[in-house]
Image (spheres, rainbow, N blue to C red):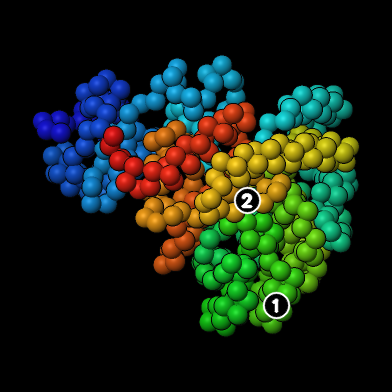
Amino acid sequence: MTNWLPDLTSGSGPLYQRLADSIETDIDRGVIDAGAKLPPQRDLAYDIGTTVGTVGRAYQLLRERGLVSGEVGRGTYVLGRHDTKTDPLAPDPHVEGTRYIDAPRGKLRFDSTAAPDIGQGDIVADVLSRTAQDHPYEISSYTRDFPDRWFEAGCSWLSRNSFRPSPDGIVPTLGTHAAVMAAIAALTTPGDYIVFEHLTYSQISRSAGLIGRRTALVTSDEEGLDPEDFERVCAQKHPKMLFLMPTAKNPTLVTLSATRREAIARVAREYNVVLIEDDLYGDLTDDPTPLLAEYAPERTIVAGGLSKSVAAGVRGGWLACPPAYRHRIRVAHKMLTGGLPFLLAEVCSRLVLSGQASEMRKRSIVEINARIAIVRETLAGFDFKAVDNVPFVWLTLPDPWLSGTFKNACLEHGVLIDDEDEFKAGRSEQVFHGVRFGVSQPSRREDIAGGVGAIRRLLDEGRAGYDSFS
């Protein structure tokens, strides 16, 4: 495009944000047409008198808004707007809720794995009402004392197979993420190394980096974390902690064998490494393998919650740890989160102790499996991994698809998925050529069929069928 310059005289905020807002306004007004190529970053930076980095941040913000796509060497192109009246993949505008918040308009959210909507609202509303009636004083004040039932609920929810935590090792938390971060903050210090697999729930490594912890990467194979490489990392970097998801790991769905769990426990004991076992997805499975905590109970912290199986919005979570760690972790959790709200903690404990949470988990699993069945039928013949009860799929892309390019292609076809970079705990040279997509967030099974159908069409057409400025 020629003879176009953004208007930066209005708006507020940093320059990159005003630049992105100005471009979005011109796209909406039709000044910049769909398919138009935006100026190269260096040229635009020169024209408006700023740095290439500022323009780059603005273009990245536009990509996050779903307005442009770009590839190295080709440039940045304006995407066409989706018409929600005609686009079969667009969300129903009459459906209320915040399911699509912070997502590009008119896209199906296959980038989330929160529990599916199976009617939790009515149940939670009833529990909320009764909690407010029973505890008006506690709701109006800060939470000073934790009642025993909150610890009992944690014991009940985290118990799986033969693992039965003790109430004196339970810490109620604002979700599983907060539980893990509280343990990291309490038991490590800035500069300490924490071990992560190359592909994992990377939000933990990013959050740990924000509070000064360093990441050490350990290799994995088709059977999961490699104990020999873990030992090598321990010998070289002397980490204080290992974070892993032994059962139905996010995003690859690998479950560690008992043999590997035992080997990991042995290495951790030898090098005095604390183990954090995220069992958030394991809680959904029927896998009988003993938890890692059973092999090294003196140094393993188990974290879990309600987000994937009951309701993410109630922020229910607990961790089970050796009793000696409990006080430090509880204090760290308060410092990091501001404290546990009585209302949420009480609602979550009532859901668990009444059996309602277990019933909702069963219903969620039924719905998840119905959606996974759609995936298995639609993607038959392609290389993907799906596990019963677990709400996401790991798709290995056929040549010549690249993970990021496929994600962009799906975005242009109305479906938000996650490429492999979303799950890299650090700067990794390993390439997996995979993407992860969830099946629990769209409100209807018809949406799942439509979204997975779009993914299938892209796979069938191959890379040659995708043009980022069509």
Quadrant, the C terminus: top left
Residue lying at the far left in this picture: please name it. 3
Q: Quadrant of residue 310?
A: top right
Task: Specify few, some or many for label 1: CA neighbours under 10 Å numbering under 14, 14-19, or 20 or more.
Answer: some
| Tag 1 residue | 263
Q: Amino acid at mark 1?
A: Ala
Q: Amino acid at mark 2?
A: Ala
| Tag 2 residue | 386
Horizontal arrangement in the rendering, residue 114 relative to residue 357 (left or right): left
Foreground residue among 94 and 58: 94
Q: Position of residue 272 (x, y in %)?
A: 68, 77
Say which residue appears at 47% left-offset and 36% top-offset: 454
Q: Earlier in the sequence, mark 1 or mark 2?
A: 1
Question: Distance from label 1 to label 2 (Cα)?
Answer: 26 Å
Q: Mark 1 and mark 2 in contact? Answer it, CB < 8 Å.
A: no
Q: Position of residue 85 (x, y in %)?
A: 45, 17
Say which residue appears at 86% left-offset and 61% top-offset: 162
